């Protein structure tokens, strides 16, 4: 059995400078991760790795700094969400750290600051999008946050209740409300995913980093998560 220091990881790759907003990066990474699981988990070449990876489905977010690196990443077996020439994310089937190969070893961890996610959804957002709600008490780098959103996307898809959402390409919105609002949302019985971090990197073990609410338009969200204001901690009316 491989040592614990050589775990299986799904590598998520973004192109440097192509995505400016955390919400968009999370949405695309989540969609790519779900597509990767659906495309490769039953493939004989990857099935064993997926089976071993699923109990501890770790993900690492990297960035391709050059056009050459980006094209080399896309030459690997992968799933992709978005526009390859613009905003997009790639997910690679799980592999061990020792099996990353020269290309992934050269890529940097995604640590650049992206524009923060809004506290609430725009009232005009009518998409049937999954809503990823970040825990403001869990202070994480951009790359860690993107990986946590991808965890939530895969958990939601694996639950079997959001197949129409998967078929639509996994549209999503990422919100970062106040601690009070997050606590209210995290306590709801209708969450379709709840990510509890193992505590191996940036947050203590057992931290709930992201919860996801079922796909729907912004107007179907709790009133504390939608409204015209997207800069302050309060949105809409009190629930």
Image: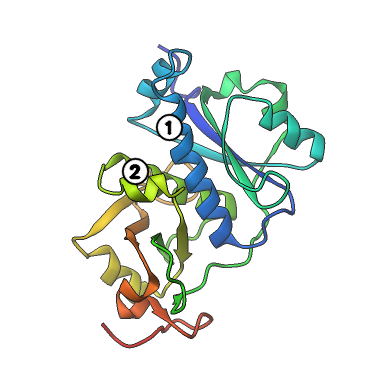
Q: Nearer the viewer, residue 166 or 141?
A: 166
Choose top left, top right, bottom left or bottom right for residue 76.
Answer: top right
Label tally: 2
Question: In the image, residue 178 lies at what x, y percent?
Answer: 40, 75
Where does residue 222 sit, x and y in percent of width and height?
A: 30, 75
Judged left or right of residue 151, residue 231 is: right
Is the residue under label 1 in contact with that under label 2 (CB below 8 Å)? yes
The x and y percentages for residue 221 are 32, 72
Q: Which residue is mark 1?
A: 37
Residue 34 lies in quadrant: top left
Residue 37, placed above or below residue 1: below
At 48% from the left and 47% from the top, the residue drawn is 30
Q: Position of residue 87 (x, y in %)?
A: 66, 52
In this view, the residue in front, 21 or 80, is 80
The image shows residue 51, relative to residue 55, as above or below, that is above
Mark 1 crowdedness (10 Å alpha carbons): few <14, some 14-19, many ≥20? many
- The disc at residue 102 is none
Which structural element holds mark 2?
A: helix
Which quarter of the rendering shows the C terminus?
Answer: bottom left
Q: Quadrant of the N terminus?
A: top left
Name the residue at 26% across, 43% down: 159
Q: Earlier in the sequence, mark 2 or mark 1?
A: 1
Relative to 62, is 142 above or below?
below
Q: Is residue 138 visible?
A: yes
Q: Which residue is mark 2?
A: 157
Identified at 44% across, 18% down, the residue is: 43
Which quarter of the picture shows residue 69?
A: top right
Query: Residue at the location (48% across, 33% down)?
Result: 36
């Amino acid at each position: 059995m491989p040592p614990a220091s050589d775990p299986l990881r799904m590598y998520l790759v973004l192109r440097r400078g192509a995505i400016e907003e955390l919400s968009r990066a999370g949405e695309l990474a989540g969609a790519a991760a779900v597509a990767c699981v659906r495309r490769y988990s039953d493939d004989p070449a990857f099935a064993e790795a997926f089976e071993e990876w699923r109990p501890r489905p770790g993900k690492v977010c990297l960035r391709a700094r050059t056009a050459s690196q980006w094209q080399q990443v896309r030459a690997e077996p992968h799933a992709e969400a978005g526009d390859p020439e613009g905003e997009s994310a790639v997910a690679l089937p799980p592999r061990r750290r020792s099996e990353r190969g020269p290309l992934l070893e050269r890529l940097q961890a995604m640590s650049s600051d992206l524009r923060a996610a809004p506290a609430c959804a725009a009232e005009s957002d009518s998409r049937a999008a999954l809503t990823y709600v970040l825990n403001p008490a869990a202070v994480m780098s951009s790359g860690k946050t993107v990986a946590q959103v991808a965890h939530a996307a895969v958990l939601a898809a694996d639950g079997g209740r959001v197949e129409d959402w998967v078929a639509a390409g996994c549209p999503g919105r990422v919100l970062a409300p106040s601690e009070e609002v997050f606590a209210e949302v995290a306590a709801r019985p209708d969450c379709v995913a709840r990510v509890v971090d193992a505590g191996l990197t940036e947050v203590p073990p057992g931290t709930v980093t992201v919860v996801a609410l079922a796909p729907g338009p912004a107007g179907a969200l709790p009133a504390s998560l939608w409204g015209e204001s997207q800069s302050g901690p309060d949105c809409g009316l009190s629930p």
